[in-house]
Image (spheres, rainbow, N blue to C red):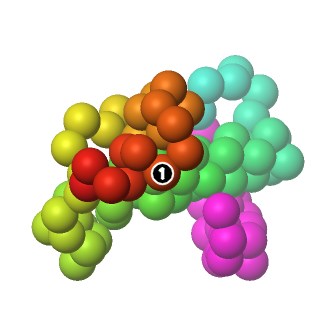
């Protein structure tokens, strides 16, 4: 995964942790909130949301390449690997 926006994640997590700890500590999971702990929680939440967007949402629903035809019968996880590994070299490509 290239181009992870580390600086933007850090800036937003820093501002969010300041706001959450100072103004709305009742929204946090801990009874004794800290800036550093809240910073890491917000940063990880942003990172996982970004990964979900990059891996699931964008390629499947938002990419302009999502309508390009592909070979039939591929799995979402390994693609065409099972066919390529099971048949002699080049045979699956000839069928496609």
Q: Magenta segment, which residues? A: 1-27
Name the residue furthest right: 36
In the displayed structure, 74 sits above or below 9; it is above
Image quarter of the C terminus: bottom left
What residue is at 73 percent from the left and 71 percent from the top?
A: 6
Element at badge 1?
Answer: loop
Residue 10 in view: yes
Image quarter of residue 7? bottom right
What residue is at 70 percent from the left and 21 percent from the top?
A: 31
In the displayed structure, 44 sits above or below 81; it is below
Residue 20 in view: no
Please state if 68 lies on the left or on the right of 31 as rendered.
left
Q: Position of residue 79 (x, y in %)?
A: 41, 41
What residue is at 60 percent from the left and 60 percent from the top?
A: 16
Q: Mainly helix, strand or loop, the magenta region?
A: helix
Q: Position of residue 66 (x, y in %)?
A: 22, 65
In the displayed structure, 84 sits above or below 42; it is above
Q: Position of residue 3 (x, y in %)?
A: 66, 76
Q: Nearer the viewer, residue 78 or 81?
A: 81
In the displayed structure, 93 sits above or below 77; it is below
What residue is at 17 percent from the left and 63 percent from the top?
A: 69
Residue 8 in magenta?
yes
Q: Nearer the viewer, residue 91 or 62?
A: 91
Please state if 70 lies on the left or on the right of 43 as rendered.
left
Q: Nearer the viewer, residue 24 or 45?
A: 45
Residue behind mark 1: 90
């Amino acid at each position: 995964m290239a181009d992870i926006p580390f600086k933007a994640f850090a800036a937003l997590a820093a501002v969010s942790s300041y706001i959450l700890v100072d103004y709305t500590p009742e929204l946090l999971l801990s009874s004794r909130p800290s800036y550093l702990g809240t910073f890491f929680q917000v940063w990880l939440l942003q990172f996982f949301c970004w990964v979900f967007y990059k891996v699931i949402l964008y390629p499947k629903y938002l990419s302009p390449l999502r309508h390009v035809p592909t070979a039939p019968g591929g799995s979402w996880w390994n693609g065409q690997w099972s066919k390529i590994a099971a048949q002699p070299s080049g045979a699956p490509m000839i069928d496609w």
